[in-house]
Amino acid sequence: MVSAVFHSPRDTASPAASAATTPVAAVSRPASPAAEQPKVKPPRRPFDGRGLALRVLPPVLSIALLIGLWALATMKGGSFPTPAATFDAAVQLFADPFYRNGPNDQGIGWNILNSLGRVGMGFGLAALVGIPLGFIIGRFEFANRMVSPLIALLKPVSPLAWLPIGLLAFKSANPAAIWTIFICSIWPMVVNTAVGVQRVPQDYLNVARVLKLSEWKVITRILLPAVLPYVLTGVRLSVGTAWLVIVAAEMLTGGVGIGFWVWDEWNNLNVAHIIIAIVVIGTVGLLLEWLLLTLAKQFTFDGD
């Protein structure tokens, strides 16, 4: 029992000897990465109150100034409604925006949706025609020289000048409004797409020629990725144009739509509803612009 307590001289050998007798796996085992490099949380970014104030305060002050001037101008009464009266009318109007009391008496929600539907159809047709046409114009010099004079001639034409042509051709107000949106929103997409194709570096096309790529592969693998930011810019401009045109076209053609609703409220001398419609039209246009601008940023590479 006593001998079990003592150690032999081998047991008390030098550390070098004990290290020599230690298994290799035990000596060469590295420490865990967590033990060597403990995770350090990145410091929290300080709250930028000044930046937030610079983003929020200017638009709030501009809106407050506008409402203040509006209130001062309508203090003495008159046919123009006050901000308070307009706000009360808006509350009543948006309490039930989707009512139906007949084909020509529907809530503002249905009018907005009908206008957006026409814009979507006209804009979609313009994209189907305008983007491929822009690729053709930018890619082939002969097509560019042939089509450019027509674009220069037709692009400055007022949108409402195309409406009688649509009424004559389609014999109906709804297709005529879609036609007007189509013909007015196609030009930004054609021009921007063609400019994007023309600005593709010639070295890319030279490499494609050396590799003997087909025209389809040149378009899909070289031109399309490079031209996509230009295409989206044209799309964004076209949507703004389409939303402007639909209001004017619906005023003349009638039916259900935000433009017709504005004209109908004018015939009823309901100025408060006209002001509400102006705010709604601007808000919808701003949302469309913001959505497409956000989409365009996803395909814009700044090299950061």
Image: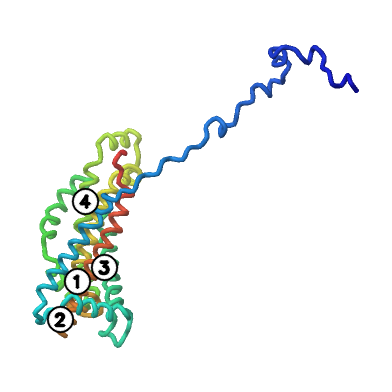
Q: Which residue is mark 2?
A: 266
Residue 154's spot in the image, x, y percent? 12, 60
> In the image, which disc is placed on residue 192?
4
Between residue 149 and residue 235, name the one nearer to us: 235
| Three-letter code for the amino acid on which mark 2 is drawn | Trp
* Labels 2 and 4: the sequence-earlier one: 4
- Say which element carries label 2: helix
Which quarter shows the N terminus?
top right
Residue 17's spot in the image, x, y percent? 72, 12
For discs 2 and 4, the disc positioned in front in the rendered view: 2
* Labels 3 and 2: the sequence-earlier one: 3
Q: Quadrant of residue 181?
A: bottom left
* Labels 1 and 2: the sequence-earlier one: 2
Residue 65's spot in the image, x, y percent? 15, 65
For discs 3 and 1, the disc positioned in front in the rendered view: 1
* Labels 4 and 3: the sequence-earlier one: 3
